[in-house]
Amino acid sequence: MIGFATVLSEPLVFRFGTSGRMEGLTALFFLASIYVAGSKREHILKSFLAGILLSCSAMTHPFGASFGLVSLFFLVRDRISILQKVFFFILGGIIPICLWAVYIHPDWNLLTIQFGAQLIRKQILFGSFTALTKLKVFLFGFAFSKLRLIIIITQIFTLVLVSISLYKKKHELNSRLNVYWIWILSVAVALYSSSEGWYVFHFIFPFAWGMALLAEQKYFGRILSLAGISLSFAGWLHIVNIHWIQTDSTYILNTQFQKLETILKPHNKVYLQTIPDPYFHLSEKYPEKKFLEFIPGELEFPSNEYTRTIESQDAFVFYDDSLKNQAISLFLSNHPEWIREEWEIPVPSNHWLHFKTIVYHKPTGNENASP
């Protein structure tokens, strides 16, 4: 049984890394896509390459697909050979998807289970979160979130007024304002539908584009831009202070992973549902072991395949006991002889590593042996 992590963490994201690196690569490929799409070189291969890069963005994380209209607008804004550009843009986007499909084909059934689970989770989050909760999720991604929200609202309101004024004068918006509205609305819709705080990172780019537009406006626009830049810089200093000056996050994270290494050393099949994510660290340390990573493991799966996967594990790692689904809870309750270990990562409550670690592992008979 290969398991869910092999499908999600290896073929789907090409083993690019943990969540932060995935988001960074998603943004990198997308920015490369709009750089190519917006270049002045008039060649049909521009559309083809922009499509490939956008597809790579979506392959590192599906969130990247929400930026498709932005890249496409850069290509067709001159209104020349629109159909031809759209065709080659789509063709370029199809190629990485086809290569990816061939690569993961041996594990296709497991991918459908994994991706289906993600869709179920999104549906639950979308249906259960109120508008206020979604706003809190959005603010999760910012330092000084209340002040940042005021600046974001002020920016959007100001650019609405600028857009209305310009449209009244010229009966159209310039291409930069069009890019802003397409970009920020694409991100806003994607964030609203995803209900995940991790993705707020992608809001930074259209927000910065809007600040650049406002910087061209006299007086209030420039003041707002300077306020936004100053707050962003202060937020960066605040985060650096918490995570790197007050505490050595690298040392703490390595210590956390080393402790997991020691506990999991005798076990060959490990189920991970924990933050911070140790998957790639443990896979590199123990390439011969099977690590299954399935963060939305609190969802219920009645399938026999999933139950067999659970029953075949030698250890489980969680960051919250309440997130075990019924199949895992039942399995552990039927095996009271399993050893449970729990500890908190020693950081302040406002640190990004403020999580517990809970490990259930099968007894090996050597627990009381001298090291």
Image (cartoon, grey):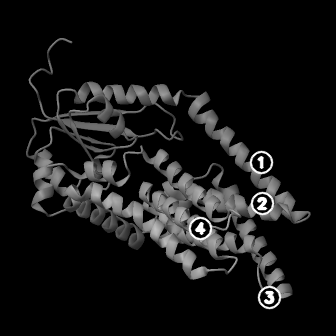
Which of the two discs, 3 and 2, labels the residue nearer the N terminus?
A: 3
Q: Amino acid at mark 2?
A: Ala
Residue 98 point in image, percent of width and height = 35, 63
Judge left or right: residue 298 versus residue 178: left
Q: Amino acid at mark 3?
A: His
Residue at disc 4, secondary structure: helix
Crowd class of label 2 (few under 14; some 14 to 19; many from 20; radius 10 Å): some
Residue at the image point whose x is 51% and y is 62% from the top? 54
Residue 153 point in image, percent of width and height = 70, 67
Please give the label number shown on residue 212. 2
Crowd class of label 4 (few under 14; some 14 to 19; many from 20; radius 10 Å): many
Which of the two discs, 4 and 3, labels the residue nearer the N terminus?
A: 4
Q: CA distance from mark 1 to mark 2?
A: 14 Å
Q: CA distance from mark 3 to mark 2?
A: 23 Å
Residue at the spot of label 3:
171
Q: Are marks 4 and 2 in contact (CB under 8 Å)?
A: no
Which of the two discs, 4 and 2, labels the residue nearer the N terminus?
A: 4
Residue at the image point whose x is 58% and y is 69% from the top? 44
Residue at the spot of label 1:
230
Q: CA distance from mark 1 to mark 4?
A: 29 Å
Residue at the image point whose x is 63% and y is 71% from the top? 75
